[in-house]
Image (tube, helix red, strand yellow):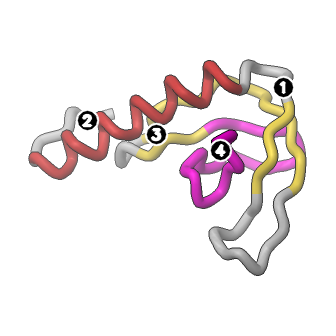
Amino acid sequence: MRDPKTREEKAKAYDSLKLIKKFNKLYPVGSTVILRHVASDDYPYEPHIVKFEAYLFPGFEAVAFFEGISGCFSIEPDFIKYPD
């Protein structure tokens, strides 16, 4: 992965790293996460099991792997139901 160059890229990478830390603390491998596949209130949340710790994907996106989902998936709050 390349290093962030612009101020915007650095801010996004920093925010993503904070989210990754939060996600990995709340949802260790093997735990159940409630997520939805589309960032819309019209789509229901469903339980999925965390397969691997979250990490920073190229492009500074915070992602993780879940059982039942092919490839990595965003852990942004639009998709994951985080506790209040």
Q: Work out how far the residue at label 3 is from the one at label 4, CA to CA, in angstroms.
A: 9 Å
Tell me the SS state at disc 3.
strand
Q: Residue at x 57, y 52 (%)?
A: 77
Q: Which residue is mark 1?
A: 31
Q: Which residue is mark 2?
A: 2
Left or right of 12? Residue 41 is: right
Q: Residue at x 48, y 35 (%)?
A: 19
Q: Quadrant of the N terminus?
A: top left
- The kind of residue on which mark 3 rests is Phe
Binning the other alpha carbons within 10 Å of mark 2 as few (below 14), some (14 to 19) or many (20 upward) gives few
Q: Work out how far the residue at label 3 is from the one at label 2, CA to CA, in angstroms.
A: 10 Å
Where does residue 53 sit, x and y in percent of width and height?
A: 64, 23
Q: Work out how far the residue at label 1 is from the one at label 4, CA to CA, in angstroms.
A: 16 Å
Where does residue 45 sit, x and y in percent of width and height?
A: 83, 59
Report the span colored magenta.
64-84
Q: Nearer the viewer, residue 67 or 21?
A: 21
Q: Which residue is mark 4?
A: 72
Q: Earlier in the sequence, mark 1 or mark 4?
A: 1
Q: Which residue is mark 3?
A: 57
- The kind of residue on which mark 4 rests is Cys
Q: Earlier in the sequence, mark 3 or mark 2?
A: 2
The reply to whether discs 4 and 2 touch (Cβ–Cβ < 8 Å) is no
The reply to whether discs 3 and 2 touch (Cβ–Cβ < 8 Å) is no
Q: Work out how far the residue at label 4 is from the one at label 2, CA to CA, in angstroms.
A: 19 Å
The reply to whether discs 3 and 4 touch (Cβ–Cβ < 8 Å) is yes
Magenta stretch: dominant secondary structure: loop
Tell me the SS state at disc 2.
loop
The reply to whether discs 1 and 4 touch (Cβ–Cβ < 8 Å) is no
Left or right of 39? Residue 32 is: right
Q: Residue 56's image quarter?
A: top left
